[in-house]
Image (cartoon, grey):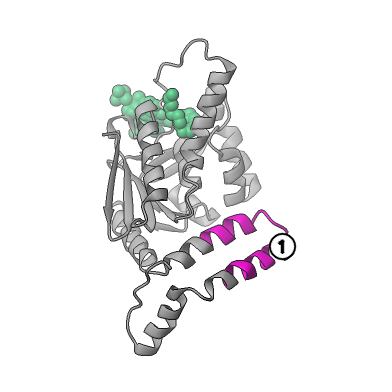
Amino acid sequence: MPVDVSVTDGVAEITLNRPEARNAIDAEMRERLHEAWRRVGSDPEIRVALVTGAGTKAFCAGADLKRTMPPQESFAQLTFNSTRSQHLLTGMNTDKPIICAINGYAIGGGLEMALACDIRLASTNAELGLAEVRHGTIPGGGGTQHLPRAVPQSLAMQMLLTGDRINAAKALESGLVSEVETPEGLLPRAREMANRIARNGPLAVRAIKRVVREGMAMPLASALQFEQFVWGNLRDTEDRVEGRRAFAEGRVPQFKGR
Ligand SMILES: CCCCCCCCCCCCC/C=C/C(=O)SCCNC(=O)CCNC(=O)[C@H](O)C(C)(C)COP(=O)(O)OP(=O)(O)OC[C@H]1O[C@@H](n2cnc3c(N)ncnc32)[C@H](O)[C@@H]1OP(=O)(O)O
């Protein structure tokens, strides 16, 4: 299968599995990814998602450049496809946190997928770039908007206009990724982080993702009001009571998500 999904202790691990094509996204992988993101969003047992690539060379080399494009895609069909391409990423708009373990090349749609995630970790051999301009097009999966929001605009424009890749060190320095690990250490680190998030209050975890993502698009005053509103909604939850009770009793809280 071009996409493997395994769920353990509330963590859904999604692996892009076409290493022979540097995990490039063809039509079948796109459909399986849609299914995976739908499962993450709908399965109450899943609290966190972790996405990575099979093999040691690439997270994802982007859209499959060898796929045959129908010669005369109607505009409606193109719109549908672009919508669905967008959906590959917007489908990730679950309110559950997604960690991306970038285990090698993340290019084009591969970097766009990583940019749609909440936490990005990279291995020392990773290289990240948006090559679309070299193919006579522009990123179609959110890259022109997410990259300048993730790194300084000058670096984003340099990457977009040249199609150049940056290495893991530059990605860390620019804040595109939050940590760099050895190839052997990347997945264990990502899994450890995912498991710690999965043990936190699930309502609070999802509220944090929502408040940050939606608040960033608001004026500061409105965003602070939004935070207060969401904080108030959590005040009377069983999880908040359990958190305080567990601290007082010196034990690990058992959150139920209500
Ligand atoms: C209806 C279908 C829908 C499809 C999907 C739609 C949704 C997609 C998500 C949303 C996307 C929006 C728009 C996105 C656009 C893009 O992503 S454009 C593509 C951008 N990517 C690239 O330009 C990368 C091209 N590849 C490379 O530069 C290099 O391969 C590499 C990644 C740097 C790796 O180099 P190296 O390790 O030297 O390996 P290679 O020998 O080059 O490659 C190994 C084999 O893998 C094949 N391959 C690599 N990349 C792709 C690819 N993108 N598409 C198809 N195949 C790829 C390569 O051809 C080799 O194959 P073999 O020759 O058969 O061994």
Quadrant of ligand 1 in image? top left
Q: Residue 62, percent across and down?
A: 43, 33
Q: Residue 180, percent across and down?
A: 40, 56
Looking at the rendering, in which quadrant would you find the C terminus?
bottom left
Could one spot residue 123 in this view of the protein?
no
Left or right: 208, with 98 as reference point: right
Q: Residue at x 62, y 46 (%)?
A: 148
Q: Residue 13, percent across and down?
A: 31, 50
Could one spot residue 105 in this view of the protein?
yes
Q: Residues within 10 Å of mark 1 (few under 14, many from 20)?
A: few
Residue farthest top in this picture:
71
Q: Residue at x 35, y 46 (%)?
A: 52
- Of 119 and 200, the residue lying toward us: 200
103, above or below 110, in the image: below
Q: Residue 85, percent across and down?
A: 49, 32
Question: In terms of secondary structure, what is the magenta stretch mainly?
Answer: helix
Q: Residue at x 38, y 53 (%)?
A: 49
194, above or below 122, in the image: below
- Of 164 and 187, the residue lying toward us: 187
The amino acid type, in three-letter code, at marker 1 is Ser
Circle 1 is placed at which residue position?
Answer: 222
- Of 16 and 186, the residue lying toward us: 16
Question: Which region shows up in magenta?
Answer: 208-231
Element at badge 1?
helix
Looking at the rendering, in which quadrant would you find the N terminus?
top left
In the image, the residue with mark 1 has its CB under 8 Å from the nearest atom of ligand 1: no
Q: Residue at x 58, y 61 (%)?
A: 211
Q: Quadrant of residue 34?
A: top left
Q: Is residue 228 magenta?
A: yes
Q: Is residue 72 magenta?
A: no
- Of 102 and 157, the residue lying toward us: 102
